[in-house]
Amino acid sequence: MNQRATLKTIAKATGYSITTVSRALAGYDDVAEATRAVIQSSAQQLGYFPNLTARQLQKQRTDTIGIILPSVGPRFADPYFSLILAGIGDEIAVSGYDVLISARPPGPAELEAYRSIVEGRRVDGIVVIRTRLEDERIAYLVERSFPFVAFGRTALDLDYPYIDEDGEAGTYELILHLAQLGHERIAYIAAPQDLTFGYNRHKGYQRALEETGLVYRPEYVEVGDLTRRGGSAAAEKLLAQSMPPTAIVAANDLMALGTMNRLQQKGLKTGFDISVAGFDDIPTAEALGLTTLNQPIYRIGHQLSQMLLALIEGQHLAEPKMVLKPKLLIRASVGPPA
Amino acid sequence: MNQRATLKTIAKATGYSITTVSRALAGYDDVAEATRAVIQSSAQQLGYFPNLTARQLQKQRTDTIGIILPSVGPRFADPYFSLILAGIGDEIAVSGYDVLISARPPGPAELEAYRSIVEGRRVDGIVVIRTRLEDERIAYLVERSFPFVAFGRTALDLDYPYIDEDGEAGTYELILHLAQLGHERIAYIAAPQDLTFGYNRHKGYQRALEETGLVYRPEYVEVGDLTRRGGSAAAEKLLAQSMPPTAIVAANDLMALGTMNRLQQKGLKTGFDISVAGFDDIPTAEALGLTTLNQPIYRIGHQLSQMLLALIEGQHLAEPKMVLKPKLLIRASVGPPA
DNA sequence: TTGAAAGCGCTAACAA
DNA sequence: TTGTTAGCGCTTTCAA
């Protein structure tokens, strides 16, 4: 990499002081027009570009926000992550901010990454995604009073801004729909229960069963790892029962798709022999006619960005806590019991 | 955000100089054990964490690599981008690096973003994705001799490290397969021709037609914008011809999927009435039985990261230029002509 | 209108 | 073993 031009270089070249050069380039109005012209042309000629790191150190701000993906292997490829990332990235770019991304598996290394970018002052704010009931990341950020917004709630009694979707209400509505179609044996492939959304969605399932007078049977509930493969494995177990379910609802679309795969392998027709539904409405869901609950993840990313930027600017948030109702999309994967 | 502890704070607290504190914490062995103990406990107590920005300024390195996504609207959500990002992010994290991401539409703003992170010294290296025939980004990086690797070749006569897939050979093989099935009217939905992969894949189409003795008809070629919607629109035009094609090949899966949608709307059965094929093998492709060409994008991301890190370390690359052969996956979307 | 000086927080060469 | 000094490149206060 060739030698860089700095303010010093220009100062030397033009004979002015570093201070004047800095001010001329920054557009201050207390610089003589002639001087500014000289300095600007010199800067141009030398290919000057400010060293952002130095500026950050001085200004104590980075114009960057951070996201640490709770990644488990290639899970980064999860459409959920890409969508939220897209929403955040696109919106943040408009304001001239950048996004710093790290991928860490949940646990000590993850928290260490938070400490690193927070204490190390690498970012001005953080977006926390996929919250957990006992979320140490949020506890930490609140304690440090560092600007952040979260996609999701927690069980912690802490005050912080978030957007969440009402997973309980959504799942409740879905199960109700199935019950109305006549399903009585509705199985559920749950998400890990330490994840807030996993807990909430499962609660919706439970509540719907209760209110429709159906029995909650533990053998009809499997916990999956949110992947397609996990969904497939869970479906296998559910179908192996002596009294197999007539409908299988998964806590996310990926597992629902895995379930559909498994049904196909077994020669069962989704939507006829067995109904399947998911949650998220990822692109593939529409293509395969999967009944699911839609939440506008991309747009939520937008909103989270706006909230975070406002926070960074020290503004007060008009609506710091939002819970969105997901929209039930009935598609071909669901029908009356066989 | 509460007050931060710096080296100075600890120096004041312990009575040692900033230098000694720095060295004690950095683990230099020319510090008395007793001193180190005192300093470390003080640091611990004060919750000290080094200011990474300051360190970067001093060390002239950021332990960060940059990726600027050529985004057009929510295109960030393109599985291609997510996958490559996943591959890069996961691999880079292992080495303790972070990823800085910006999203800019191709054009002046994009180049400006490159200049900003390069000249501004915000990153130690860059991954350029989705190269173009006349790629100004690459011309710029080469000229600045800044460490970078590219996913894709260019038409420029420049020496730089890249991994690319052989889009020409892949498409060639696919078209050949269709011809062997008996297709004579094979239409093509091309990618924009300024994109290297778009150009190459189209070339494969052309060459295959020639070699099988089929005619290249301009009216059988549409250029799409790589989205589902674009594929759908292009398919519409192709099907409106007096002599419609019996097979439609798209330059990427998303457009192929759009084509399938359109066929379905028209009541045509993909794979029977009309054959459809794509390129990329995104997750949905398998689910929908789309014939396509697979390239291991995620793993390519891994490799690009490794190459880039080696470059940053000043190492010599054993194999700086790699061209991978995509794998043809025949699925149900393709059959003999109706 | 311009410049000197201080400082952001850190590292490192050199001296003591 | 420890401290002094200088410097990374920038911004900003204050004085001239």
Image (cartoon, coloured by chain):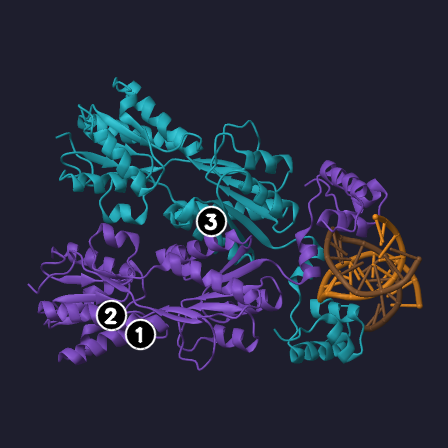
Chain colours: A cyan, B purple, C brown, D orange
**Would you name the residue on which mark 3 appears?**
A302
Mark 1, Cα crowd under 10 Å, few <14 / some 14-19 / many 20+, is many
Q: Nearer the viewer, mark 3 or mark 2?
A: 2
Residue B200 - label: 1
Expressed as whole percent of the image width and height from the top left, the position of residue A290 reads 24, 42
Q: Give the amino acid at mark 3.
A: His
Chain at tag 3? A
Q: Are marks 3 and 1 on the same chain?
A: no
- Number of numbered discs present? 3
Expressed as whole percent of the image width and height from the top left, the position of residue A282 reads 32, 46
Q: Give the amino acid at mark 2.
A: Thr
Expressed as whole percent of the image width and height from the top left, the position of residue A78 reads 38, 47
Q: Earlier in the sequence, mark 2 or mark 1?
A: 2
Residue positioned most to the left = B338
Q: Are marks 3 and 1 in contact (CB under 8 Å)?
A: no
**Would you name the residue on which mark 2 appears?**
B171
Residue A313 - label: none
Residue at position x 41%, y 33% in the image = A197
Label 2 secondary element: helix
Q: In terms of image quadrants, where is residue B105? A: bottom left
Expressed as whole percent of the image width and height from the top left, the position of residue A71 reads 45, 45
Q: CA distance from mark 3 to mark 2?
A: 38 Å
Q: In terms of image quadrants, where is residue B190? A: bottom left
| Up-down relation of residue B238 to residue B4 (above or below) | below
Q: Are marks 2 and 1 in contact (CB under 8 Å)?
A: yes
The N terminus of chain B lies in which quarter of the figure?
top right
Direction from residue A101 to residue B168 in the image, left or right: left
Q: Nearer the viewer, mark 3 or mark 1?
A: 1
Q: Are marks 2 and 1 on the same chain?
A: yes
Mark 2, Cα crowd under 10 Å, few <14 / some 14-19 / many 20+, is many
